[in-house]
Amino acid sequence: SILRLYLDMEQGDLFLALGRYNGSRGRLEYPNAVLGAWRNWQYQE
């Protein structure tokens, strides 16, 4: 997927890869929103 390519380009840094995916690399809004939503869906015992 394109996100995998961006993860490789950013050497595994999900935060930077998400910014690149959205076209807003270096800005905090999109990566923070995605990671915040992802935390809401994580399984917790």
Image: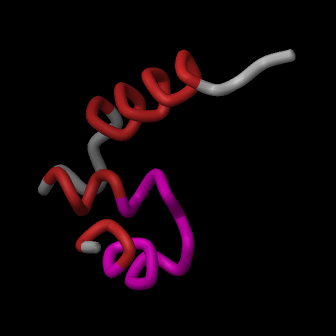
For the point 37% across and 33% down, the residue is 34
For the point 27% across and 43% down, the residue is 27
Q: Is residue 9 magenta?
A: yes
Q: Secondary structure of the magenta portion, mostly?
A: helix
In this image, 16 relative to 3: left or right?
Answer: right
Q: Is residue 39 above or below residue 11?
A: above
Question: The C terminus lies in which quarter of the figure?
Answer: top right
Question: The N terminus lies in which quarter of the figure?
Answer: bottom left
In this image, 4 relative to 19: left or right?
Answer: right
Q: Is residue 36 magenta?
A: no
For the point 54% across and 22% down, the residue is 41
In this image, 22 relative to 37: left or right?
Answer: left
In this image, 40 relative to 32: left or right?
Answer: right
**Range of magenta residues:** 5-17
Is residue 2 or residue 6 the one in the foreground? 2
For the point 37% across and 40% down, the residue is 31
